[in-house]
């Protein structure tokens, strides 16, 4: 069964998805979302810095990876009923980030199939100290 947020990720305007998501996030998580989207918008319009190290990620990709840690449901949905789970909220935030940076198909595919370099480094057994 599709949740309301899942339905909104399928072609609804990003503003509608953002409004529905913000209704369901706890206060600190709403602040995180606003900051992440503002950073993504800024990066979308800025040329990539020539002096950025090859291994560093754009800030929005780090935020993409962080969404699961920062998108927690408020106690109940807007009408007092249980709302969508944390995974649905994180996925909605990720969709908004992809819209904000105008990610192409290749970028979205890479992030969903391989993850970000940050998430890969955390899971790599050789990278742990």
Image (cartoon, rainbow, N blue to C red):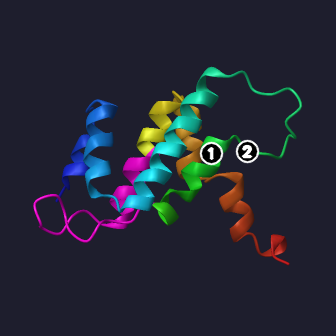
Specify the segment rendered in magenta.
71-94
SS under mark 2:
loop
Rendered image quadrant of residue 65: bottom right
Whether residue 9 is visible, yes or no, is: no
Side of 59 where 71 appears, left or right: left
Relative to 1, residue 45 above or below: above
Which residue does the numbered mark 1 point to in the structure image?
61
* Residue 60: image location, x then y, percent: 60, 42
- Name the one closer to the observer, 127 or 41: 41
Rendered image quadrant of residue 13: top left
- Neighbourhood count class around disc 1 (C-alpha, 10 Å): few under 14, some 14–19, many 20 upward: many
The CA span between labels 2 and 1 is 6 Å
Does the magenta segment cover residue 78? yes
Q: Are marks 2 and 1 in contact (CB under 8 Å)?
A: yes
Relative to 117, residue 109 above or below: above
Side of 2 where 58 appears, left or right: right
SS under mark 1:
helix
Q: Residue at x 57, y 35 (%)?
A: 40
* Residue 114: image location, x then y, percent: 62, 53
Which residue does the numbered mark 2 point to in the structure image?
57
- Extreme residue toward the bottom, this view: 129
Q: Residue at x 69, y 40 (%)?
A: 58
- Name the one closer to the observer, 108 or 72: 72
Rendered image quadrant of residue 95: top left
Side of 68 where 47 appears, left or right: right
Q: Residue at x 37, y 49 (%)?
A: 92
* Residue 113: image location, x then y, percent: 56, 51
- Name the one closer to the observer, 26 or 14: 26
């Amino acid at each position: 069964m599709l949740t309301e947020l899942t339905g909104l990720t399928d072609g609804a305007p990003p503003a509608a998805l953002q409004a529905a998501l913000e209704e369901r996030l706890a206060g600190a998580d709403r602040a995180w979302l606003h900051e992440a989207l503002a950073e993504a918008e800024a990066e979308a319009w800025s040329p990539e810095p020539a002096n950025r190290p090859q291994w560093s990620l754009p800030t929005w990709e780090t935020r993409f990876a962080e969404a699961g840690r920062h998108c927690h449901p408020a106690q109940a949905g807007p009408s007092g009923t249980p709302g969508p789970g944390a995974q649905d909220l994180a996925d909605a935030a990720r969709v908004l980030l992809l819209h904000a940076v105008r990610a192409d198909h290749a970028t979205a595919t890479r992030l969903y199939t391989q993850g970000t370099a940050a998430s890969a480094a955390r899971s790599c057994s050789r990278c742990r100290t």
